[in-house]
């Protein structure tokens, strides 16, 4: 079968590789669509802590068909250990020893059965793949106060994650303002029912979806007294963000991290996509094949979009 293989920073090759041999707790999934995300760009450009040693496979937003049963599945990107303190406390998204499932940019993947989620019938493969990042947005919204307590929401960053957050918050009936310097991204936010601005202020809840220390600071400064800031964007390893102490103390701001998602949040994301509550097509680009993946990952600026990669010939069901 064919697979996209990373041999080093910005060295992606499409190669003929051996068919995956599923272990006892794994199943073979023929990939129908895998979508690209910012994490893939980081993996391609400079490597990533969860990437295996080179040569390495990647792609973690993956939908396909089980080779054994023919069922349509989303391949979740991780399986929590179930035994560490966060897992025992019901927070699998911060598991201390997760098993990551990478390799969606290939014609097939051997995936732990525990990572698989059933895909609703009406949902096409590219939409199912996008349930993975949408689940992270669902999780971030779950980390915020509910709508009645925080009706005015701000989102910093109009990339795919910021757009997904805005879509979920609009669907909940919150007033949403998304801030991004790119006019194309502000237009995308407006198309989904949010307002847009160069900056936001005085919000009951602020979602940081940029992943840079200066944006973390801007998020704190954008919160109304008594407000909540949810940090969704991961900064480069070793980053520090100096935060203004005055509002943290005198305005009693709540600062909350949001990382990853739980299996239940993945199922919720699949249901939201199937219901049409979130318009995944607004972010979709392509489809492209494996040969065009490097070019898609190299794209900078412009509207927020996720490339749909279709690695092989159509899957026969
Ligand atoms: Zn992703
Ligand atoms: Zn765990």
Image (tube, rainbow, N blue to C red):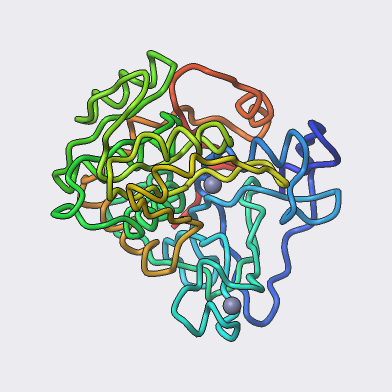
> In the figure, 83 relative to 278: above or below?
below
> In the figure, 55 relative to 154: above or below?
below
Report the label total.
Answer: 0
Residue nearest the viewer, comparing 142 with 217: 217
Q: Quadrant of ligand 2?
A: bottom right
Is 8 on the left or on the right of 146, as rendered?
Answer: right
Q: Position of residue 39 (x, y in %)?
A: 61, 43
Q: Quadrant of the C terminus?
A: bottom left
Q: Who's the residue at 48% across and 55% down the image? A: 257
Q: Residue furthest top?
A: 183
> In the figure, 83 relative to 2: above or below?
below
Q: Position of residue 173 (x, y in %)?
A: 13, 44
Q: Quadrant of residue 105?
A: top right
Q: Position of residue 41 (x, y in %)?
A: 65, 35
Q: Quadrant of residue 158?
A: top left
Is 111 on the left or on the right of 286, as rendered?
Answer: right
Residue nearest the viewer, comparing 246 with 271: 246
Residue nearest the viewer, comparing 281 with 140: 140
Q: Position of residue 270 (x, y in %)?
A: 33, 57
């Amino acid at each position: 079968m064919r697979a996209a293989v990373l041999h080093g920073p910005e060295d992606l090759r499409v190669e003929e590789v051996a068919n995956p041999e599923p272990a006892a707790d794994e199943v073979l999934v023929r990939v129908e669509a895998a979508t690209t995300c910012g994490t893939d760009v980081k993996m391609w450009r400079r490597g990533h802590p969860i990437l295996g040693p080179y040569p390495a496979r990647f792609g973690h937003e993956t939908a396909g068909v089980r080779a054994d049963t023919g069922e349509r599945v989303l391949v979740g990107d991780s399986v929590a250990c179930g035994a560490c303190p966060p897992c025992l406390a019901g927070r699998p998204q911060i598991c201390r020893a997760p098993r990551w499932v990478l390799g969606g940019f290939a014609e097939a993947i051997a995936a732990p059965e525990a990572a698989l989620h059933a895909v609703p019938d009406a949902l096409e493969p590219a939409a199912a793949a996008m349930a993975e990042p949408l689940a992270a947005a669902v999780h971030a919204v779950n980390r915020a106060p509910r709508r009645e307590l925080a009706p005015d929401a701000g989102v910093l960053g109009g990339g795919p994650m910021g757009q997904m957050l805005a879509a979920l918050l609009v669907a909940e009936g919150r007033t949403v303002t998304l801030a991004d310097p790119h006019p194309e991204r502000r237009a995308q936010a407006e198309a989904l029912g949010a307002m847009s601005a160069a900056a936001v202020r005085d919000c009951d809840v602020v979602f940081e979806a940029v992943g840079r220390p200066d944006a973390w600071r801007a998020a704190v400064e954008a919160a109304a007294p008594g407000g909540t800031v949810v940090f969704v964007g991961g900064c480069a390893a070793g980053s520090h963000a100096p935060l203004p102490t005055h509002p943290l103390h005198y305005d009693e701001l709540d600062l909350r991290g949001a990382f990853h998602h739980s299996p239940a949040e993945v199922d919720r994301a699949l249901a939201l996509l199937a219901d049409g509550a979130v318009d995944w097509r607004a972010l979709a680009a392509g489809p492209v094949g494996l040969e065009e993946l490097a070019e898609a990952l190299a794209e900078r600026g412009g509207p927020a979009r996720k490339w749909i990669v279709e690695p092989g010939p159509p899957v026969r069901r």
